[in-house]
Image (tube, rainbow, N blue to C red):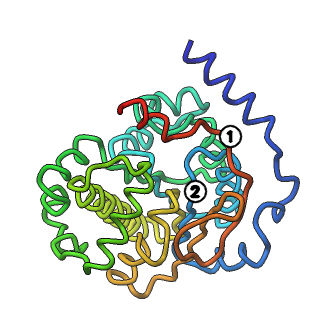
Amino acid sequence: MKALAILIAFVLLAALPQPSNADELIPQDVLDDMQAADVVILGEIHDNPRHHLVQAEAVAAIAPSAVVWEMVTEEGAQRLAQKAASNPEELSRILRWAESGWPPLSMYYPVFQAANVPVYGAMVPRTAARAAMERGAATTLGADAARYGLTVALPDDDQAAREADQLAAHCDALPAEVLPQMVAIQRLRDAVLTRAILRAADETGGPIAVITGNGHARKDRGIPTFLTRLRPGLKVFVLGQSEDGLIDGDFDAVVDSPAAEREDPCKAFEAQN
């Protein structure tokens, strides 16, 4: 049944409009800027298939020495390094993708295909996320917490803005006392992604491509703020991806796509009430 589901997903992906030449999805001037950067952060809305085609085009143009993935754990990346995958089913098995909770691997497979380079995992496992909610992000990250700024509270206005974003992202259904914990987990994920980027750059020399959500990519709040503080000499380029012109945050460039067809995410919260 799993094999059939993967096959069906790939048939559906193939039905999407495919780029006929290198600059169809990404303007050439944006590709030029990407190719001049040390780190290229490629944002996305996770369940929009076209966003992953844009990422695949970008990765092919960048020709990175490594790709850092928000969707892959460190352990998954290590397993993949030990046994390269020759097809999507094997890749899914090695990365245990079906257990990860991310959208189907078929959406992301073009990105994996775009560059045969080392994969660095930066996914925060559920156990670590739960620990961050219970004991704080700094405790969860351990010795690296101070280096990544997790021992310092955010300014009040920044904290309030991030809590408001988390509330909106969860359909205004979260209790107020949970919001600081959600912000802490987001900061933890930013830190883990940044740590993986720096390790990839040190070990492979760069350039590095990063596959992550728009929230982690944004220059005013996410990974770039960590990189600026920790490695100011790195030239970082950030691509955001909007739907029907809508996106939050600051980016070096934004590529727009039609909104993906999806069920109303708020229905799940309504069902709990």
Badge 2 crowding class, 10 Å Cα cut-off, few under 14, some 14 to 19, many 20 or more, is many
> Which is in the foreground here, disc 2 or disc 1?
1
Residue furthest front as drawn: 273
Q: Name the quarter where the C terminus is drawn.
A: top left
Q: CA distance from mark 2 to mark 1?
A: 15 Å
Circle 2: residue type:
Glu
Which of 79/232 is in front? 232
> Residue 148 location in percent, x, y?
25, 72
Q: Residue at x 50, y 57 (%)?
A: 213
Q: Which residue is mark 2?
A: 44
Q: Position of residue 36 (x, y in %)?
A: 63, 80
Q: Residue beneath label 1, please?
A: 261
Query: SS class of the residue under badge 2?
Result: loop
Locate residue 33, reporting x and y percent: 67, 79
Amino acid bearing label 1:
Glu
Outermost right residue: 20
Is 95 placed above or below 138 here?
A: above
- Foreground pick, 97 / 75: 97
Give the residue displayed 82% in from the left and 65% down from the top.
Answer: 23
Q: Residue furthest top?
A: 1
Q: Mark 1 packing: few (<14 Cα in 10 Å), some, or many (20+)?
A: few
* Quadrant in the picture for residue 61: bottom right
User: Is residue 202 rendered to the left or right of residue 13?
Assistant: left
- Answer left or right for 207 relative to 233: right
- The residue under the point 68% across, 45% down is 260
The residue that appears at 63% across and 62% down in the rendered structure is: 241
The answer to which of 82 and 196 lies nearer the viewer is: 196
Mark 2 vs 1, N-terminal side: 2
